[in-house]
Amino acid sequence: MEKEAFLISRLHSRYIGDDAAVVGEWIYSADAFCEGSHFRRAWMSPAQIGRKAMLVNISDAVAMNADPRYALVTVMLPREIETEAISELTEALEETAAEYGCEIIGGDTVGGDALHLSITLISRSDAPLLRRGLEPGDLLAYTGTLGTSKRDLERLMQGEEIPADSRFYEPVLRRDFVKKARPLLRAGMDISDGLYCDVNKLLDANGLGLEPLLEIPAEIGESGEEYEMLIAFDASHCDSLLSIAQEEGTALTIFGRVASNRFRYPCRSQHFRSGT
């Protein structure tokens, strides 16, 4: 995480700092999904790999209240991969993109020793949700239930099987919730590096701290690749947002209040890393 932050700090564009870059009404994002860093082929079918690769990219658009329109997909194909597996992979990519109104319009392929995917999304939004905009007194909350992605990753790494509908395989994106809630939200982002790390990112972007209202245990705070929403809002909107969450069938957990202090969680990203 420190090296990632250092790399980003060496870039000097005013568009950097959110889940995606806002240029006018267009939203641009790119994300990689790499064998050995995010998954092992022994854990997932080609279809599961293609679907999750597209979902985690679309999550950046969803997190910013944007509609994905076009995708560019670059794939490094292992030399031994069979054409049947390639077909499964590409069908899953296209079908998943189409579920969200997105079309794959190009990309690149290259041979290599592992399966890596990099996807660039071009999305559109009339009211993008940014990380900036927090004010002292705002409440912080997250959607859904956190912790299952970390739990199931640990099971996979121990050689156990996990359910086919596990969050590790099949992230749940809160598109409808974000669209309905957007007028009431001050700031937000998706939870990809774990709640601890992503809360810190949100606070850093605004130069503020936090007054915890709930104790967040490590099995929740360190669970990466959840892709639930982390949101901030004025306390006066609490009841309305809880009603929207109920309508959408998702839990909404309020865990902190933005404050003028230096509070930060201990940040240990829980992405899978080969050899760990």
Image: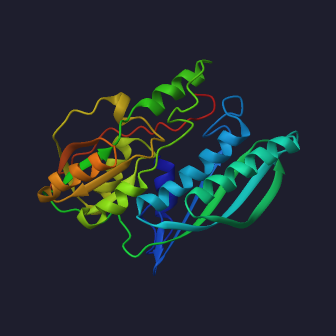
Spot the residue most to the front.
247
Left/right placement of residue 16 relative to residue 38 reads left
Q: Position of residue 102 (x, y in %)?
A: 60, 64
Q: Nearer the viewer, residue 246 or 251?
A: 246
Rendered view: 165 above or below 261: above
**Picture residue at 58% right of the left edge, 35% below the top:** 273
Q: How is the image coloured?
A: rainbow
Q: Is residue 20 above or below residue 145?
A: below
Residue drawn at x 84%, y 51% is 111
* In the image, farthest residue toward the bottom: 24
Kindly indicate the quadrant of the structure image that contains residue 253.
Answer: top left
Q: Position of residue 126 (x, y in %)?
A: 40, 76
**Camera-side residue: 262 or 98?**
98
Residue located 77% across and 62% down the image: 108
Pinpoint residue 260: horizontal percent, then vertical percent. 14, 56
Q: Is 95 positioned to the left or the right of 77 in the image?
A: left
Which quadrant of the figure has residue 131?
bottom left
Q: How many marks?
A: 0
**Of residues 2 and 113, which is closer to you in this image?**
113
Residue 210 in percent (x, y) is at 19, 48
Where 52 sits versus 110, above or below?
A: above
The C terminus, quarter of image: top right
Instruction: Identify which residue is drawn at 36% across, 42% down.
Output: 195
Instruction: Say whether residue 96 is left or right of residue 233.
Output: right
